[in-house]
Image (tube, rainbow, N blue to C red):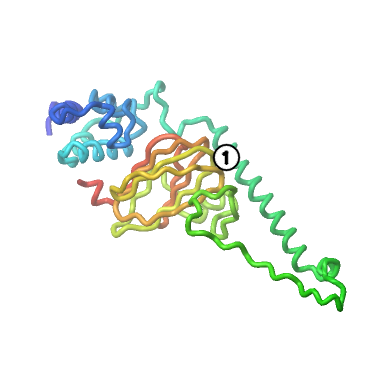
Amino acid sequence: MTESETLNIGNKLRHRRQELNLSLDEVARQTKIRKTYILAIEEERFEELPGKVYIVGFLQNYARTLGIPAKPLVEAFNQMPEPAPNSAYPRPELRDSTLTARGRSSFRRILLVLLVLMLAAVVLFYSPQILEMFRPPAGTGNPPAHQESPAVSAEEPLVPSAPAAIPDAPHSYEESEAQAGTVKSPPVIPEGGGTLKIISQGEGEFRIAIDGDPARKYAAQPGLTLSWEVRQQADLDLDVDGPVRLMIGNQEYTAPGRGQVLLSTPSVQEE
């Protein structure tokens, strides 16, 4: 492949978009890629994009939207020298570390409060001395009331009003890194699919589109944990004031709170 062939990625995408009479705003809405990123791709200003893994995902998503093969574009991009980082467009991993520290601190405080409440509940309900204080006198003929757990409606929202204790979640961010294989780029979905778990460590919102279905919006708060079954692809658009942990299989990746993350199987990446 000659150098001239590797330098027309943006022209091919722009000409195809113009043939379909699509505006940058329409493409951004369909692909869930920011308009500034699409314009940078068409003008081949790859150094202004977050990184090589993100660029490959953007090219695949953009090509599918325009109805053209993605593989030649990805191969042409891989032949180009890796873009040097541009200080005017910092990569997501260079965000202020104070946000990450704030999210971890809030998560630990919530876990501590929940632990204290659980301990108090155990003492209250299982201590014989305390039960004697609340037991009615003998012979009153008033049997103790039966307290039932409130029924959980099927219409309950996916996002709880307050973070709840998660039995299988690690008690700290450091413990989670020791339990799963931490990766530096978005994890790859195994062939055949798997369960994608998301743990938010900040407040905000995010959208997720799975296997081509319409994107769904969720409110995020520290300690929120959600999971989905993914077959081939998951596209996340994050707007959270803290990091977001993604886990699938034995892979764990900490994504920045703001930006787009594209996960797919190896076969989809090769398309």
Left or right: 153, with 21 as reference point: right
Q: Is residue 238 above or below residue 11?
A: below
Dividing the picture into quadrants, the one containing residue 75 is top left
Q: Is residue 74 visible?
A: no
Q: Is residue 144 above or below residue 76?
A: below
Quarter holding the N terminus is top left
Residue toward you, 47 or 108: 108
Left or right of 119, for residue 241: left
- The image quadrant of residue 118 is bottom right
Q: Residue furthest top?
A: 88
**Residue 228 visible:** yes
Check the image and report above or below for 39 versus 199: above
Residue sitting at x 36%, y 58% = 194
Indicate the secondary structure of the residue bearing disc 1: helix
25 lies left or right of 76:
right
Q: Residue at the location (34% across, 25% down)?
A: 48
Q: Residue at x 51, y 45 (%)?
A: 200
Q: Which residue is mark 1?
A: 103
User: x, y percentage for residue 100?
Assistant: 55, 37
In percent of width and height, residue 27 lies at 26, 32
Q: Residue at x 43, y 38 (%)?
A: 238
- Above or below for 264 versus 63: below
Q: Nearer the viewer, residue 205 or 252?
A: 205
**Residue 204 locus on image (x, y percent):** 50, 37
Q: Nearer the viewer, residue 269 or 184?
A: 269
In the shown orientation, is residue 173 left or right of residue 9?
Answer: right
Q: Amino acid at mark 1?
A: Gly
